[in-house]
Protein backbone atom coordinates (compact mmCIF):
# COMPACT_ATOMS: atom_id res chain seq x y z
CA UNK A 1 0.00 0.00 0.00
CA UNK A 2 2.86 2.37 0.84
CA UNK A 3 4.51 1.66 -2.52
CA UNK A 4 1.22 2.33 -4.36
CA UNK A 5 0.77 5.70 -2.62
CA UNK A 6 4.36 6.57 -3.46
CA UNK A 7 3.85 5.68 -7.11
CA UNK A 8 0.66 7.77 -7.33
CA UNK A 9 2.39 10.78 -5.76
CA UNK A 10 5.33 10.43 -8.13
CA UNK A 11 3.05 10.00 -11.13
CA UNK A 12 1.20 13.24 -10.41
CA UNK A 13 4.14 15.29 -9.19
CA UNK A 14 4.05 17.13 -12.55
CA UNK A 15 0.29 17.10 -12.82
CA UNK A 16 -0.15 18.86 -16.17
CA UNK A 17 2.37 16.65 -17.97
CA UNK A 18 0.85 13.49 -16.51
CA UNK A 19 -2.71 14.55 -17.39
CA UNK A 20 -1.73 15.40 -20.97
CA UNK A 21 0.03 12.04 -21.31
CA UNK A 22 -3.05 10.26 -19.94
CA UNK A 23 -5.30 12.14 -22.37
CA UNK A 24 -3.11 10.89 -25.20
CA UNK A 25 -3.38 7.36 -23.81
CA UNK A 26 -7.17 7.63 -23.55
CA UNK A 27 -7.47 8.75 -27.17
CA UNK A 28 -5.01 6.13 -28.44
CA UNK A 29 -6.52 3.17 -26.55
CA UNK A 30 -10.05 4.26 -27.46
CA UNK A 31 -9.11 4.63 -31.14
CA UNK A 32 -7.33 1.27 -31.05
CA UNK A 33 -10.43 -0.41 -29.60
CA UNK A 34 -12.79 1.26 -32.06
CA UNK A 35 -10.68 0.29 -35.08
CA UNK A 36 -10.42 -3.30 -33.82
CA UNK A 37 -14.21 -3.35 -33.39
CA UNK A 38 -14.67 -2.18 -36.98
CA UNK A 39 -12.51 -5.08 -38.16
CA UNK A 40 -14.53 -7.48 -35.99
CA UNK A 41 -17.77 -6.07 -37.42
CA UNK A 42 -16.49 -6.77 -40.93
CA UNK A 43 -16.06 -10.40 -39.95
CA UNK A 44 -19.33 -10.60 -38.00
CA UNK A 45 -21.11 -12.34 -40.86
CA UNK A 46 -18.38 -14.99 -40.86
CA UNK A 47 -18.56 -15.52 -37.10
CA UNK A 48 -22.33 -15.93 -37.24
CA UNK A 49 -22.30 -18.73 -39.80
CA UNK A 50 -23.21 -22.36 -39.19
CA UNK A 51 -20.96 -25.33 -39.94
CA UNK A 52 -24.01 -27.37 -41.01
CA UNK A 53 -25.04 -25.02 -43.84
CA UNK A 54 -23.69 -24.87 -47.37
CA UNK A 55 -24.34 -22.29 -50.07
CA UNK A 56 -24.81 -23.37 -53.66
CA UNK A 57 -24.54 -20.69 -56.33
CA UNK A 58 -23.86 -20.38 -60.03
CA UNK A 59 -20.21 -21.25 -60.72
CA UNK A 60 -19.82 -18.21 -63.00
CA UNK A 61 -21.01 -15.49 -60.63
CA UNK A 62 -23.64 -14.62 -58.06
CA UNK A 63 -25.32 -12.44 -60.67
CA UNK A 64 -26.26 -15.56 -62.66
CA UNK A 65 -29.31 -17.38 -61.20
CA UNK A 66 -29.99 -21.09 -60.85
CA UNK A 67 -33.08 -22.98 -62.04
CA UNK A 68 -35.74 -23.67 -59.43
CA UNK A 69 -35.85 -27.37 -60.31
CA UNK A 70 -32.36 -27.82 -58.87
CA UNK A 71 -33.91 -27.90 -55.39
CA UNK A 72 -35.22 -31.46 -55.65
CA UNK A 73 -31.99 -32.75 -57.16
CA UNK A 74 -29.93 -31.16 -54.36
CA UNK A 75 -32.29 -32.63 -51.78
CA UNK A 76 -31.64 -36.12 -53.15
CA UNK A 77 -27.85 -35.83 -52.69
CA UNK A 78 -26.51 -38.10 -49.96
CA UNK A 79 -25.80 -36.18 -46.75
CA UNK A 80 -28.26 -33.35 -47.47
CA UNK A 81 -31.01 -32.99 -44.86
CA UNK A 82 -32.67 -29.75 -45.96
CA UNK A 83 -32.79 -27.28 -48.84
CA UNK A 84 -34.12 -23.77 -49.23
CA UNK A 85 -33.36 -20.82 -51.46
CA UNK A 86 -33.14 -17.04 -51.44
CA UNK A 87 -32.96 -14.20 -53.92
CA UNK A 88 -31.39 -10.78 -53.47
CA UNK A 89 -34.01 -8.06 -53.95
CA UNK A 90 -32.04 -4.82 -53.71
CA UNK A 91 -34.88 -2.36 -53.15
CA UNK A 92 -34.87 1.14 -51.67
CA UNK A 93 -36.81 2.19 -48.58
CA UNK A 94 -37.62 5.93 -48.85
CA UNK A 95 -34.03 6.91 -49.74
CA UNK A 96 -30.85 5.18 -50.92
CA UNK A 97 -29.23 5.99 -47.57
CA UNK A 98 -31.52 3.47 -45.87
CA UNK A 99 -29.60 0.43 -47.04
CA UNK A 100 -30.36 -2.99 -45.57
CA UNK A 101 -30.25 -6.55 -47.00
CA UNK A 102 -33.52 -7.75 -48.51
CA UNK A 103 -34.07 -11.38 -49.51
CA UNK A 104 -36.96 -13.22 -51.11
CA UNK A 105 -36.98 -16.65 -49.46
CA UNK A 106 -39.01 -19.84 -49.39
CA UNK A 107 -40.46 -19.13 -45.94
CA UNK A 108 -41.06 -22.50 -44.27
CA UNK A 109 -37.85 -24.24 -45.32
CA UNK A 110 -35.69 -21.12 -44.90
CA UNK A 111 -36.74 -20.47 -41.31
CA UNK A 112 -36.18 -24.16 -40.53
CA UNK A 113 -32.54 -23.76 -41.58
CA UNK A 114 -31.99 -20.69 -39.36
CA UNK A 115 -32.92 -21.68 -35.78
CA UNK A 116 -30.87 -18.71 -34.52
CA UNK A 117 -33.77 -16.46 -35.58
CA UNK A 118 -36.01 -16.48 -32.49
CA UNK A 119 -39.56 -15.76 -33.61
CA UNK A 120 -42.87 -16.03 -31.77
CA UNK A 121 -45.12 -18.86 -33.00
CA UNK A 122 -48.02 -16.54 -33.83
CA UNK A 123 -45.73 -14.24 -35.82
CA UNK A 124 -44.22 -17.18 -37.70
CA UNK A 125 -47.68 -18.47 -38.58
CA UNK A 126 -48.87 -15.03 -39.69
CA UNK A 127 -45.85 -14.68 -41.97
CA UNK A 128 -46.30 -18.10 -43.53
CA UNK A 129 -49.98 -17.39 -44.31
CA UNK A 130 -49.51 -13.90 -45.77
CA UNK A 131 -48.04 -13.90 -49.27
CA UNK A 132 -47.23 -10.18 -48.93
CA UNK A 133 -45.94 -10.52 -45.38
CA UNK A 134 -42.37 -9.88 -44.30
CA UNK A 135 -40.02 -10.55 -41.38
CA UNK A 136 -37.31 -8.23 -40.09
CA UNK A 137 -34.60 -8.42 -37.44
CA UNK A 138 -34.95 -6.52 -34.17
CA UNK A 139 -32.14 -4.09 -34.99
CA UNK A 140 -33.75 -3.14 -38.31
CA UNK A 141 -37.18 -2.71 -36.71
CA UNK A 142 -35.75 -0.47 -34.00
CA UNK A 143 -33.86 1.63 -36.53
CA UNK A 144 -37.00 2.56 -38.48
CA UNK A 145 -39.53 2.27 -35.66
CA UNK A 146 -41.46 -0.52 -37.35
CA UNK A 147 -44.18 -2.41 -35.47
CA UNK A 148 -46.14 -5.57 -36.23
CA UNK A 149 -48.82 -4.80 -38.82
CA UNK A 150 -47.01 -1.83 -40.40
CA UNK A 151 -47.15 -1.47 -44.16
CA UNK A 152 -43.64 -1.08 -45.61
CA UNK A 153 -43.26 0.25 -49.18
CA UNK A 154 -40.00 -0.61 -50.97
CA UNK A 155 -39.08 0.69 -54.38
CA UNK A 156 -37.59 -2.03 -56.55
CA UNK A 157 -34.37 -1.52 -58.50
CA UNK A 158 -33.65 -4.96 -59.95
CA UNK A 159 -37.38 -5.64 -59.91
CA UNK A 160 -39.10 -2.34 -60.89
CA UNK A 161 -42.15 -0.96 -59.18
CA UNK A 162 -43.24 -0.22 -55.63
CA UNK A 163 -43.61 -3.32 -53.50
CA UNK A 164 -45.68 -3.04 -50.34
CA UNK A 165 -45.19 -5.54 -47.53
CA UNK A 166 -46.98 -6.08 -44.23
CA UNK A 167 -44.72 -6.63 -41.25
CA UNK A 168 -45.77 -9.95 -39.69
CA UNK A 169 -42.85 -10.73 -37.41
CA UNK A 170 -39.68 -9.42 -35.76
CA UNK A 171 -36.99 -11.90 -34.84
CA UNK A 172 -34.38 -11.66 -32.09
CA UNK A 173 -30.96 -13.23 -32.47
CA UNK A 174 -30.02 -16.18 -30.30
CA UNK A 175 -26.83 -14.27 -29.39
CA UNK A 176 -25.02 -11.03 -30.14
CA UNK A 177 -23.43 -12.48 -33.31
CA UNK A 178 -26.78 -13.10 -35.01
CA UNK A 179 -27.61 -10.67 -37.81
CA UNK A 180 -30.75 -8.68 -36.93
CA UNK A 181 -30.63 -6.28 -39.88
CA UNK A 182 -32.18 -8.38 -42.65
CA UNK A 183 -35.56 -8.09 -44.38
CA UNK A 184 -37.20 -11.35 -45.54
CA UNK A 185 -40.30 -11.85 -47.66
CA UNK A 186 -41.94 -14.58 -49.76
CA UNK A 187 -40.05 -15.73 -52.84
CA UNK A 188 -43.38 -16.84 -54.34
CA UNK A 189 -44.66 -13.25 -54.22
CA UNK A 190 -41.57 -12.08 -56.12
CA UNK A 191 -41.82 -14.98 -58.56
CA UNK A 192 -45.47 -14.39 -59.42
CA UNK A 193 -44.86 -10.73 -60.11
CA UNK A 194 -41.73 -11.47 -62.14
CA UNK A 195 -43.60 -14.11 -64.15
CA UNK A 196 -46.08 -11.50 -65.32
CA UNK A 197 -43.22 -9.37 -66.60
CA UNK A 198 -40.65 -11.94 -67.75
CA UNK A 199 -42.38 -15.27 -68.10
CA UNK A 200 -40.18 -18.31 -67.41
CA UNK A 201 -37.38 -16.13 -66.04
CA UNK A 202 -39.30 -16.13 -62.77
CA UNK A 203 -38.45 -19.80 -62.12
CA UNK A 204 -34.91 -18.99 -61.03
CA UNK A 205 -33.31 -18.34 -57.64
CA UNK A 206 -30.16 -16.58 -56.48
CA UNK A 207 -28.62 -19.21 -54.19
CA UNK A 208 -29.58 -22.43 -52.48
CA UNK A 209 -29.06 -22.87 -48.76
CA UNK A 210 -28.26 -26.50 -48.02
CA UNK A 211 -28.34 -28.19 -44.63
CA UNK A 212 -26.06 -31.18 -44.11
CA UNK A 213 -26.01 -33.93 -41.49
CA UNK A 214 -22.31 -33.82 -40.63
CA UNK A 215 -20.06 -30.70 -40.81
CA UNK A 216 -16.95 -32.84 -41.38
CA UNK A 217 -18.49 -34.11 -44.60
CA UNK A 218 -18.95 -30.61 -46.06
CA UNK A 219 -16.21 -30.99 -48.74
CA UNK A 220 -17.53 -34.37 -49.89
CA UNK A 221 -21.16 -33.23 -50.00
CA UNK A 222 -20.15 -30.05 -51.85
CA UNK A 223 -18.43 -32.17 -54.51
CA UNK A 224 -21.49 -34.38 -54.81
CA UNK A 225 -23.78 -31.40 -55.35
CA UNK A 226 -21.49 -29.77 -57.93
CA UNK A 227 -21.01 -33.14 -59.65
CA UNK A 228 -24.77 -33.44 -60.01
CA UNK A 229 -24.84 -30.37 -62.27
CA UNK A 230 -21.52 -30.78 -64.04
CA UNK A 231 -21.67 -29.98 -67.78
CA UNK A 232 -25.18 -28.52 -67.36
CA UNK A 233 -26.23 -25.10 -68.64
CA UNK A 234 -25.90 -23.75 -65.10
CA UNK A 235 -23.03 -25.42 -63.29
CA UNK A 236 -22.82 -24.84 -59.55
CA UNK A 237 -20.24 -23.93 -56.94
CA UNK A 238 -20.96 -25.17 -53.42
CA UNK A 239 -19.04 -24.02 -50.35
CA UNK A 240 -19.56 -23.68 -46.64
CA UNK A 241 -21.51 -20.70 -45.41
CA UNK A 242 -18.34 -19.41 -43.75
CA UNK A 243 -16.35 -19.61 -46.99
CA UNK A 244 -19.21 -17.88 -48.81
CA UNK A 245 -19.14 -14.97 -46.35
CA UNK A 246 -15.34 -14.79 -46.44
CA UNK A 247 -15.61 -14.27 -50.18
CA UNK A 248 -17.33 -10.94 -49.54
CA UNK A 249 -14.87 -9.97 -46.80
CA UNK A 250 -11.91 -10.67 -49.09
CA UNK A 251 -13.16 -7.95 -51.45
CA UNK A 252 -12.28 -5.44 -48.73
CA UNK A 253 -9.06 -7.11 -47.59
CA UNK A 254 -6.88 -4.10 -48.45
CA UNK A 255 -9.10 -1.85 -46.33
CA UNK A 256 -8.96 -4.25 -43.40
CA UNK A 257 -5.17 -4.48 -43.60
CA UNK A 258 -4.97 -0.67 -43.58
CA UNK A 259 -7.28 -0.40 -40.55
CA UNK A 260 -5.25 -3.01 -38.68
CA UNK A 261 -2.03 -1.18 -39.51
CA UNK A 262 -3.40 2.17 -38.36
CA UNK A 263 -4.60 0.67 -35.06
CA UNK A 264 -1.10 -0.56 -34.22
CA UNK A 265 0.58 2.64 -35.46
CA UNK A 266 -1.57 4.58 -32.97
CA UNK A 267 -0.25 2.41 -30.14
CA UNK A 268 3.34 2.91 -31.30
CA UNK A 269 2.89 6.68 -31.40
CA UNK A 270 1.53 6.87 -27.85
CA UNK A 271 4.33 4.52 -26.78
CA UNK A 272 6.84 7.09 -28.03
CA UNK A 273 5.01 9.89 -26.22
CA UNK A 274 4.93 7.86 -23.02
CA UNK A 275 8.63 7.01 -23.34
CA UNK A 276 9.44 10.71 -23.67
CA UNK A 277 7.45 11.46 -20.51
CA UNK A 278 9.28 8.80 -18.52
CA UNK A 279 12.69 9.94 -19.84
CA UNK A 280 11.97 13.50 -18.72
CA UNK A 281 10.84 12.19 -15.32
CA UNK A 282 14.05 10.17 -14.89
CA UNK A 283 16.32 13.09 -15.82
CA UNK A 284 14.56 15.42 -13.38
CA UNK A 285 14.94 12.92 -10.51
CA UNK A 286 18.53 11.93 -11.18
CA UNK A 287 19.72 13.28 -7.83
CA UNK A 288 16.84 11.59 -5.98
CA UNK A 289 17.70 8.16 -7.39
CA UNK A 290 21.39 8.71 -6.56
CA UNK A 291 20.40 9.63 -2.98
CA UNK A 292 18.29 6.47 -2.69
CA UNK A 293 21.27 4.38 -3.78
CA UNK A 294 23.50 6.25 -1.33
CA UNK A 295 21.06 5.38 1.47
CA UNK A 296 21.40 1.71 0.63
CA UNK A 297 18.47 1.09 -1.70
CA UNK A 298 19.31 -1.39 -4.45
CA UNK A 299 19.25 -0.54 -8.16
CA UNK A 300 16.26 -2.91 -8.39
CA UNK A 301 14.23 -0.58 -6.16
CA UNK A 302 14.90 2.33 -8.51
CA UNK A 303 13.84 0.17 -11.44
CA UNK A 304 10.62 -0.77 -9.63
CA UNK A 305 9.84 2.90 -9.01
CA UNK A 306 10.16 3.82 -12.68
CA UNK A 307 8.31 0.79 -14.02
CA UNK A 308 5.61 1.19 -11.37
CA UNK A 309 5.06 4.86 -12.13
CA UNK A 310 4.93 4.18 -15.86
CA UNK A 311 2.42 1.35 -15.39
CA UNK A 312 0.22 3.47 -13.11
CA UNK A 313 -0.02 6.21 -15.76
CA UNK A 314 -0.53 3.69 -18.58
CA UNK A 315 -3.20 1.68 -16.76
CA UNK A 316 -5.11 4.76 -15.60
CA UNK A 317 -5.13 6.22 -19.11
CA UNK A 318 -5.77 2.86 -20.75
CA UNK A 319 -8.58 2.03 -18.32
CA UNK A 320 -10.33 5.32 -19.05
CA UNK A 321 -9.85 4.68 -22.77
CA UNK A 322 -11.47 1.24 -22.43
CA UNK A 323 -14.46 2.69 -20.58
CA UNK A 324 -14.95 5.47 -23.12
CA UNK A 325 -14.77 2.97 -26.00
CA UNK A 326 -18.09 1.39 -25.00
CA UNK A 327 -20.37 4.48 -25.37
CA UNK A 328 -18.47 5.68 -28.44
CA UNK A 329 -18.93 2.27 -30.09
CA UNK A 330 -22.65 2.31 -29.21
CA UNK A 331 -23.09 5.77 -30.76
CA UNK A 332 -21.08 4.73 -33.80
CA UNK A 333 -23.30 1.66 -34.27
CA UNK A 334 -26.41 3.86 -34.20
CA UNK A 335 -24.85 6.28 -36.68
CA UNK A 336 -23.93 3.65 -39.27
CA UNK A 337 -27.25 1.80 -38.94
CA UNK A 338 -27.28 -1.49 -40.84
CA UNK A 339 -23.92 -0.95 -42.54
CA UNK A 340 -22.50 -3.20 -39.81
CA UNK A 341 -25.18 -5.74 -38.81
CA UNK A 342 -23.24 -6.64 -35.66
CA UNK A 343 -21.16 -3.92 -34.00
CA UNK A 344 -20.03 -4.55 -30.44
CA UNK A 345 -16.82 -4.29 -28.46
CA UNK A 346 -15.75 -7.87 -27.86
CA UNK A 347 -13.98 -9.24 -24.80
CA UNK A 348 -10.98 -9.97 -27.03
CA UNK A 349 -10.78 -6.31 -28.05
CA UNK A 350 -10.89 -5.17 -24.42
CA UNK A 351 -8.15 -7.65 -23.51
CA UNK A 352 -6.05 -6.30 -26.39
CA UNK A 353 -6.63 -2.75 -25.13
CA UNK A 354 -5.49 -3.74 -21.65
CA UNK A 355 -2.50 -5.59 -23.07
CA UNK A 356 -1.57 -2.57 -25.21
CA UNK A 357 -1.70 -0.34 -22.11
CA UNK A 358 0.59 -2.66 -20.17
CA UNK A 359 3.05 -2.95 -23.06
CA UNK A 360 3.14 0.85 -23.47
CA UNK A 361 3.86 1.24 -19.75
CA UNK A 362 6.63 -1.37 -19.73
CA UNK A 363 8.35 -0.30 -22.94
CA UNK A 364 8.19 3.41 -22.04
CA UNK A 365 10.00 2.78 -18.74
CA UNK A 366 12.57 0.28 -20.02
CA UNK A 367 15.29 2.69 -21.21
CA UNK A 368 15.14 5.25 -18.35
CA UNK A 369 14.95 2.42 -15.78
CA UNK A 370 18.08 0.80 -17.23
CA UNK A 371 19.91 4.16 -17.26
CA UNK A 372 18.94 5.03 -13.68
CA UNK A 373 19.90 1.59 -12.36
CA UNK A 374 23.46 2.11 -13.67
CA UNK A 375 23.95 5.68 -12.44
CA UNK A 376 26.97 6.33 -10.20
CA UNK A 377 26.13 7.86 -6.83
CA UNK A 378 28.81 10.56 -7.09
CA UNK A 379 27.71 11.63 -10.56
CA UNK A 380 24.09 11.64 -9.48
CA UNK A 381 24.74 13.75 -6.38
CA UNK A 382 26.93 16.11 -8.39
CA UNK A 383 23.84 16.73 -10.54
CA UNK A 384 22.35 18.64 -7.57
CA UNK A 385 24.87 21.35 -7.99
Image (cartoon, rainbow, N blue to C red):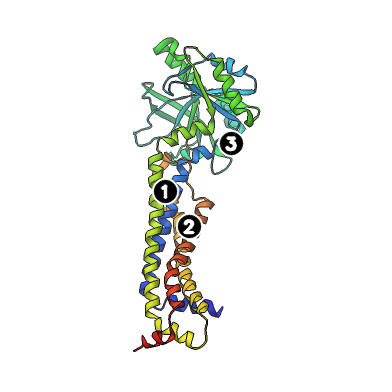
User: Residue 329: horizontal and vertical position, in percent?
Assistant: 44, 51
Sequence-first disc among 1 and 3? 3
Reading the chain from its start, which is encountered first: label 2 or label 1? 1
Mark nearer the N terminus (3 vs 2)? 3
Q: Write down the quadrant of residue 75 in the picture.
A: top right
Residue closest to the far top: 199
Q: Is residue 384 above or below residue 47?
A: below
Q: 10 Å neighbourhood of mark 3: few (<14), some, or many (≥20)?
A: some
How busy is the neighbourhood of tag 1: few (under 14 within 10 Å), some, or many (20 plus)? some
Q: Nearer the viewer, mark 2 or mark 1?
A: 1
Q: Residue at x 46, y 40 (%)?
A: 341
Q: Quadrant of residue 175?
A: top right
Give the SS element for disc 2.
helix
Q: How many marks?
A: 3
Percent position of residue 261, x then y? 39, 49
On-image quarter of the N terminus: bottom right
Mark pair 3, 2: CA separation: 31 Å
Q: Which mark is residue 116?
A: 3
**Does residue 108 show up?**
no
Cα distance, mark 1 to mark 3? 30 Å
Give the residue at mark 1: 260
The disc placed on residue 19 is none
Q: Which residue is mark 2?
A: 353
Is 85 displayed left or right of 164 in the figure?
right
Residue 240 in the image: state x and y as whole percent.
55, 30
> Does residue 32 lie above or below 334 as drawn?
below
Amino acid sequence: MFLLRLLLKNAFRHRLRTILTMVGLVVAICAFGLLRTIVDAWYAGVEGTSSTRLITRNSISLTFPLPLNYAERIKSVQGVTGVSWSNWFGGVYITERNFFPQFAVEPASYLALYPEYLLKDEERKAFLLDRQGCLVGRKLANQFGWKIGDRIPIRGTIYPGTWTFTLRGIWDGVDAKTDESQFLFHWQYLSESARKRRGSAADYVGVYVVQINEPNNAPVISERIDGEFKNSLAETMTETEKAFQLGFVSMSEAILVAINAVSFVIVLIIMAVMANTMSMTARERLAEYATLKALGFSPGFVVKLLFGESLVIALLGGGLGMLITLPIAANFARAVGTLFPVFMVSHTTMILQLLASVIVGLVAAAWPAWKMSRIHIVNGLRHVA
